């Protein structure tokens, strides 16, 4: 099985290439994306990201003070994170788009997708492509 959590960083032709490579090996594919194509839904990750950003210097074994000094007050890191969030929310691939590519590339696979909610208002997208059951294939 191949698990992917970053397809939103790639244009659809590259996503298709990933699907082609995985299905050519006969492997299953699972895609998880943290939100749908919605700034509102994407903002649900904000509290968790903020908590992780604040806790990281306190929980690391070495260099906590340096991490706090470098990551806390640097507006460039905050701006970079904000830009990544905006770009990701704009480029996220919906489950139906990935399934359509999967069905075009590997029609023998079973393709499914869905959305799972998480607090406070988030919605994560999942897609899975399962290879044909070898027991159901006709003999060669």
Image (cartoon, rainbow, N blue to C red):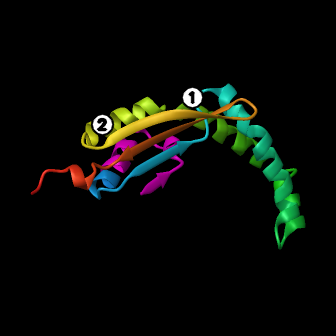
The residue lying toward the viewer, choosing from 47 and 137, is 137
| Magenta-tinted stretch | 1-20
| Quarter occupied by residue 115 | top right
The picture places residue 37, in percent across and down from the top left corner, at: 57, 28
Crowd around label 1: few <14 · some 14–19 · many ≥20 (10 Å): some
Residue at point 48%, 31% (across, down): 94
- The quadrant in which the N terminus is found is bottom left
- Please tell me whether residue 15 belongs to the stretch shown in magenta: yes
Name the spot of residue 28 as percent of width and height, x first: 38, 52
- Report the disc number at residue 58: none
Looking at the rendered structure, the secondary structure element under dot 2 is: helix
Residue to which mark 2 is pinned:
103
Q: Main secondary structure of the magenta part?
A: helix
Q: Residue at the spot x=30%, y=51% of the render?
A: 23
Instruction: Say what secondary structure mark 1 lies in.
Output: loop
Label 2 to label 1: alpha-carbon separation = 21 Å
In reply to whether residue 61 is colored magenta, the answer given is: no
The one of 96 and 66 positioned closer to us in this rendering: 96
| Residue 130 at x, y percent in the picture | 36, 47
Q: Nearer the viewer, residue 87 or 136?
A: 136
Q: Please state if 80 lies on the left or on the right of 97 as rendered.
A: right
**At x 28% / y 51%, what residue is drawn?**
133
């Amino acid at each position: 099985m191949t698990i992917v959590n970053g397809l939103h960083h790639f244009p659809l032709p590259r996503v298709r290439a990933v699907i082609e490579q995985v299905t050519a090996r006969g492997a299953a594919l699972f895609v998880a994306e943290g939100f749908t194509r919605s700034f509102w839904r994407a903002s649900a990750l904000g509290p968790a990201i903020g908590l992780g950003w604040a806790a990281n210097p306190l929980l690391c074994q070495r260099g906590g003070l340096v991490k706090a000094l470098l990551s806390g007050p640097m507006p460039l890191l905050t701006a970079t994170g904000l830009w990544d969030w905006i770009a990701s929310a704009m480029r996220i691939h919906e489950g139906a788009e990935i399934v359509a590519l999967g069905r075009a590339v590997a029609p023998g696979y079973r393709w499914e997708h869905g959305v799972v909610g998480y607090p406070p208002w988030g919605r994560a997208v999942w897609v899975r492509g399962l290879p044909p059951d070898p027991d159901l294939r006709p003999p060669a």
